[in-house]
């Protein structure tokens, strides 16, 4: 029997990324409040939030300073926009702060309200740039199979997951996908990580040549793939990919929506993994998820092109009502202030060895083929046969079942396609809570194994 709230939900709400057929039976998990790394459902049951919401609540729940920053801005100036040269101090100060933090040369910052809008903006700016540079054919965008970049028409096209394409008439023409850098799943027998990376870089080069380099504009990648399975790139991967991109003058966009703001133990994932992108997209952690905010960095050559286009066309014809929302900017500024004061990024680096040791130990479990991560992010892959890496039938829904058992144990983790489970707790998680997380996940795996048997 569904509770009153749950029943009302089923009759009124469409939920993103939910099986709307089975949902009619299961109903929602209605959360009511949060504190630290814990969230509480409408019956008062606590859950360790092992996914930081959706990879975003870096500072955990109930952070009073963030609440105060939002409240103060709400009462002072709840809304103004950045259109037609209008401005406000939180946006100016945040852009300055972000310029200081960025690991790549950054001339300006453009704000959005989500990661999807940030990556959509990247596509549009890439096209705009190449038109400004007199290269109207150089427009194709390459992303990776299992990459995740959002759900707008363009970013769902970039996303390399079947659920975002099937029956959505996507990807659009001009959006291409290259191989997924998942060594455990796609390396040939005996192939080292370096050799696998070299093969993938060769495949990317072959794709660019086949398409004609004069038509290929940009390559986009997450430093660590999130929704595709929390996949850490194999050794040498980005250096080799980068060399190919440089050879054909292909713009490199790093999607830092998950990895940005400390997740890997560095401010940005690009620093941890040696990416040197032309631009990056951010969202999520920048406000610890407390307000919707995203954005992209604009390098100086792009900025010059944008200025000359404005001179020619009369305006920079892009932006949304909530680009640089003052309350979101105020919360982001406070988030970054707390990150700096409380050494959040350093704290991730300190806690990561313990987290990763507990994660790696899961590889001993009879159901686990791979358990791997970096910083405070990790993924496990459930297999039917550890030796052959054979997977269960997708219909069996084994990882989904494991996540349901975890919920029963008071732990929220996320099920991903391909029988993978992601773990991505708030960055403020304490060492003892890391143990609680993995103890509960182990019990959920044991219950899954018993259910299969
Ligand atoms: N890029 C990455 C790497 C993401 O993980 C996500 C969301 O999970 C997005 C982009 C899209 O962000 P949003 O859901 O805020 O549109």
Image (spheres, rainbow, N blue to C red):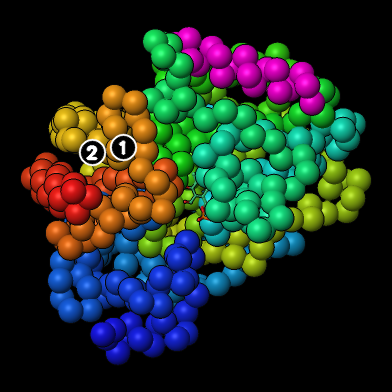
Q: Is residue 60 visible?
A: no
Q: Range of the magenta residues?
A: 194-211
Q: Is residue 432 left or right of residue 329?
A: left
Q: Which mark is residue 367?
A: 2
- Pointer 1: what residue? 383
Q: Which mark is residue 32?
A: none
- Does residue 135 lie above or below 247 as drawn? below
In reply to whether residue 205 is colored magenta, the answer given is: yes
Would you identify the image quadrant in which residue 243 lies?
top right
Say which residue appears at 42% left-offset and 23% top-offset: 183
Q: Cβ–Cβ below 8 Å for labels 1 and 2?
A: yes
Q: Is residue 410 left or right of residue 159?
A: left
Q: Position of residue 229 (x, y in %)?
A: 40, 40
Would you identify the image quadrant in which residue 10 lies?
bottom left
In reply to whether residue 4 is colored magenta, the answer given is: no
Q: Which one is in front, 82 or 180?
A: 180
Ligand 1 within 8 Å of the CB at mark 2:
no
Q: Position of residue 361 (x, y in %)?
A: 16, 31
Of helix, strand and loop, which mostly describes the magenta segment?
helix
- Does residue 123 lie above or below 78 as drawn? above
């Amino acid at each position: 029997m569904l509770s009153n709230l749950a029943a009302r939900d089923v009759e009124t709400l469409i939920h993103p990324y939910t099986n709307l057929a089975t949902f009619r039976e299961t109903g929602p998990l209605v959360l009511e409040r949060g504190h630290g790394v814990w969230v509480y459902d409408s019956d008062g049951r606590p859950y360790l939030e092992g996914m930081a919401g959706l990879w975003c609540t870096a500072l955990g729940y109930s952070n009073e300073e963030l609440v105060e920053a939002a409240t103060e801005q709400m009462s002072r100036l709840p809304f103004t926009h950045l259109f037609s040269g209008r401005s406000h101090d939180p946006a100016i100060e945040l852009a300055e702060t972000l310029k200081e933090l960025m690991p790549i040369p950054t001339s300006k910052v453009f704000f959005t309200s989500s990661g999807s809008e940030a990556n959509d903006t990247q596509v549009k700016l890439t096209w705009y740039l190449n038109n400004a540079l007199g290269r109207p054919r150089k427009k194709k965008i390459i992303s990776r199979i299992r990459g995740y970049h959002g759900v707008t028409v363009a970013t769902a096209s970039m996303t390399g997951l079947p659920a975002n394409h099937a029956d959505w008439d996507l990807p659009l023409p001009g959006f291409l996908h290259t191989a997924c850098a998942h060594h455990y799943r796609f390396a040939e027998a005996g192939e080292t990580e370096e050799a696998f990376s070299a093969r993938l870089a060769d495949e990317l080069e072959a794709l660019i040549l086949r398409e004609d380099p004069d038509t290929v504009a940009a390559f986009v990648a997450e430093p660590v793939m999130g929704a595709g399975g929390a996949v850490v790139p194999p050794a040498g991967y980005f250096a080799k990919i980068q060399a190919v991109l440089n050879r054909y003058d292909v713009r490199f966009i790093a999607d830092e929506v998950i990895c940005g703001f400390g997740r890997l133990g560095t401010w940005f994932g690009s620093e941890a993994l040696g990416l040197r992108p032309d631009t990056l997209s951010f969202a999520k952690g920048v406000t610890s998820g407390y307000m919707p905010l995203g954005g992209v960095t604009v390098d100086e050559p792009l900025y010059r092109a944008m200025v000359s286009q404005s001179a020619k066309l009369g305006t920079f014809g892009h932006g949304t009502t909530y680009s640089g929302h003052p309350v979101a900017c105020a919360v982001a500024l406070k988030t970054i202030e707390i990150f700096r004061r409380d050494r959040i990024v350093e704290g991730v680096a300190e806690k990561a060895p313990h987290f990763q040791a507990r994660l790696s130990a899961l590889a001993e479990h009879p159901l686990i083929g791979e358990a791997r991560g970096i910083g405070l992010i990790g993924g496990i892959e459930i297999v039917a046969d550890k030796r052959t890496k054979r997977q269960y039938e997708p219909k069996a829904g084994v990882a989904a079942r494991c996540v349901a058992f975890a919920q029963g144990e008071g732990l929220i983790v996320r099920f991903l396609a391909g029988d993978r489970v992601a773990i991505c707790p708030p960055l403020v998680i304490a060492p003892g809570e890391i143990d609680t997380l993995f103890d509960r996940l182990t019990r959920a795996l044991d219950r899954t194994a018993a259910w299969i048997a």
